Amino acid sequence: MATAGKLADTLDEALWFGEDDPASSDEQAQASMAAEVARISGLKPFPVVATRVLDALNQQDYSVAWVANLIESDPALASMVLRLANSAMYGRAGGYQHVDEAIVRVGGRRVRDMVSAAATMQMFNDLQGIASTFRDHCAATAAIVRVLDQHYELPGEHSLFLAGLLHDIGKLLLAETREFDYTRLSPQDLCTPDVIHRLERQELGYDHAVLGAHVLQAWTIPEPIPKIVAWHHQPTRAYAADGAIGTQVALLRIADRIAWYLAQTLMPAKFPEFLASTAEARWLSLKVDDIEGMWTRMVESRGEIMSIFT
Ligand SMILES: [Fe+2]
Ligand SMILES: [Fe+2]
């Protein structure tokens, strides 16, 4: 296990707060977060089978049969991966019975994302109370951002589904390790985007976004996912960085808002109009018609992923 001191020395400045944030110079907060990353890495290692699968799928010339056997050595993991591969979110093209078929037809990179998602959900399948609400929110955000991703058809390879699933993993970890007590927050604060991370910073000196990003790095989840996670509450930094990251952070923030909205029993009126007025929607040129056109698929995808992961 890495020591806190070693991690503090190697803490990734690119994932820390922006220049405009006074906390960026707070060495005590960085050291305290590094200690927490080290503690979590020891308490919550990424599952061995999933790590071996990711290592293999990151190679150019992996053996499909070998990777499929490895995934199938964990029946619960294999079952979740097959359900994802057969879901409407991924086209439901195959009706795949076996993991090797899914790898060949869906592709190694997407299967890598599905394995990472399924392994992470397994790590947190016994959460209770607010923490289980956060886990469901992560799953819902993944499903919704997948629909947005298909609508925008971003060029190049990207893993927005996985970024959505992992975006609030820092909250799950802070709740599970009892580093931050979310139970004393008001229901309003708990489901309002861009509030909780400020309260975490006030108390801890860091927030779930930067903590989560560093834990994902320790788990060797590839870039740009840690960066997207680190910046999901620092959108101006993401928009200033480059177009690709800015667009992915904006899509994730839209999905985040929709996921919270769909989890509420009392739905505010004119939500699509509100959503279209946000900075991220303006960044994406997302209009009310676009949102309404995707709405049914987003609701169905959210329901589908809940049935797979919960
Ligand atoms: Fe967040
Ligand atoms: Fe979120």
Image (spheres, rainbow, N blue to C red):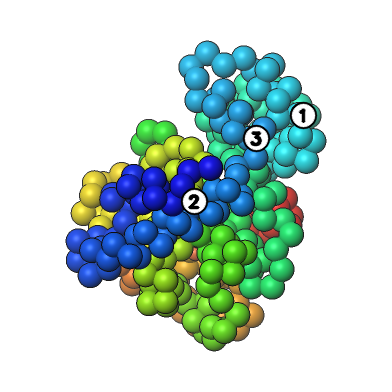
Residue at left offset 69%, top offset 73%: 129
Residue 157 image point, x, y percent:
42, 34
Q: How far is the residue under mark 3 from the one under mark 2?
A: 18 Å
Horizontal side of residue 3 vs 118, given as left or right? left
Query: In terms of secondary structure, where does tag 3 sit?
Result: helix
Horizontal side of residue 19 vs 289, given as left or right? left
Q: The disc labelled 1 sits on which kind of residue?
A: Ser
Q: Nearest to the eye among marks 1 and 3: give it.
A: 3
Residue at left offset 78%, top offset 41%: 76
Residue 174 image point, x, y percent:
54, 65
Q: Nearest to the eye among marks 3 and 2: give it.
A: 2
Query: In terms of secondary structure, where does tag 1 sit?
Result: loop
Residue 302 image point, x, y percent:
63, 58
Sequence-wise, which precedes: disc 2 or disc 1?
A: 2
Within-10-Å neighbours for mark 3: few <14, some 14–19, many 20+: few
According to the picture, the residue beneath numbered tag 3 turns out to be 48
Residue at left offset 60%, top offset 83%: 266
Question: Is residue 163 at least partly visible in the picture?
Answer: no
Query: In terms of secondary structure, where does tag 2 sit?
Result: helix
According to the picture, the residue beneath numbered tag 1 turns out to be 73
Q: Name the foreground residue: 154 vs 15.
A: 15
Q: The disc labelled 3 sits on which kind of residue?
A: Val
Horizontal side of residue 273 vs 118, given as left or right? left
Kindly indicate the quadrant of the structure image that contains residue 254. Answer: bottom left
Q: The disc labelled 2 sits on which kind of residue?
A: Ala
Question: Is residue 113 at least partly visible in the picture?
Answer: yes
Residue at left offset 44%, top offset 43%: 217
Within-10-Å neighbours for mark 2: few <14, some 14–19, many 20+: many
Within-10-Å neighbours for mark 1: few <14, some 14–19, many 20+: few
Pick the quarter of the image with the C terminus: bottom right
